[in-house]
Amino acid sequence: MQMTRVLFVCLGNICRSPTADGIFRQLVMRENLNQKILVDSAGTGGWHIGKAPDSRTVAAAYQRGYDLSILRARQVNVQDFAEFDYVLAMDKSNLSDLQRMKPSSYTGHLGLFLEFGSRGDYREVPDPYYGSNDGFELVLDLVEDAAQGLLNHIRKSPY
Ligand code: 4NP
């Protein structure tokens, strides 16, 4: 069976990309597509390898019904381009790091996650790490919207 593999990438892999991972994973499960779509997340940086997501991220997501507590941070690497059809960056800085790492032979989709969103006001998911609780709610709002758009897109054009 053909699988579509999706990797979400942010800086630390403890706030934004685990949120995208957990929300998109839940959407995939709800639609009974877990045999068809594989979901993972990683960070461009290595500071938090092996750690659970940030406690503020876990708490905010839990309030909306997502359990992120089992996720563990890892660092993105060049092999990920061999394994993932979609590599989706949370912001332009993550994207430029990934563009530098990307093998020239990569035929998948490397881009900004919010390209799949319906909101015109944000092209990037802002880093909430040094901010207030509002930032974590905004991450959830942006990710919920773009996750639905991504699923609709993959349904129309699976790899
Ligand atoms: P994330 O947030 O990229 O959404 O996981 C961050 C987490 C940690 C750091 C930066 C951003 N940090 O500098 O440790």
Image (tube, rainbow, N blue to C red):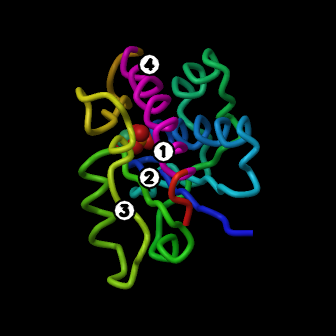
Which circle marks residue 137 in the picture?
Answer: 4
Quarter of the figure with the C terminus? bottom right
The residue that appears at 45% across and 54% down in the rendered structure is: 43
Q: Pinpoint residue 17: horizontal percent, then vertical percent.
A: 48, 44
Q: Pinpoint residue 61: horizontal percent, then vertical percent.
A: 58, 24
Q: Label 4, label 2: how many angstroms apart (C-alpha)?
A: 19 Å
Disc 2: which residue: 9
Q: Is residue 36 left or right of residue 11?
A: right
Residue lying at the far front in this picture: please name it. 156
Disc 1: which residue: 150
Q: Earlier in the sequence, mark 1 or mark 4?
A: 4
Specify the quadrant of the image occupied by residue 22: top right
Residues at badges 1 and 4 in contact (C-beta under 8 Å)?
no
Q: Earlier in the sequence, mark 2 or mark 3?
A: 2
Specify the quadrant of the image occupied by residue 122: top left
Q: Label 1, label 3: how many angstroms apart (C-alpha)?
A: 13 Å
Query: In the figure, 154 relative to 21: above or below?
Result: below
Residues at badges 2 and 3 in contact (C-beta under 8 Å)?
no
Callout in the foreground (1, 4): 1
Disc 3: which residue: 110
Specify the quadrant of the image occupied by residue 87: bottom left
Please tell me how crowded label 4 is: few (under 14), some (14-19), or many (20+) other residues with Cα within 10 Å. Answer: some
Foreground: 152 or 69? 152
Q: Earlier in the sequence, mark 4 or mark 2?
A: 2
Please tell me how crowded label 3 is: few (under 14), some (14-19), or many (20+) other residues with Cα within 10 Å. Answer: some
Ligand 1, by image quadrant, is: top left
Q: Pinpoint residue 57: horizontal percent, then vertical percent.
A: 53, 27
Local SS, label 3: strand
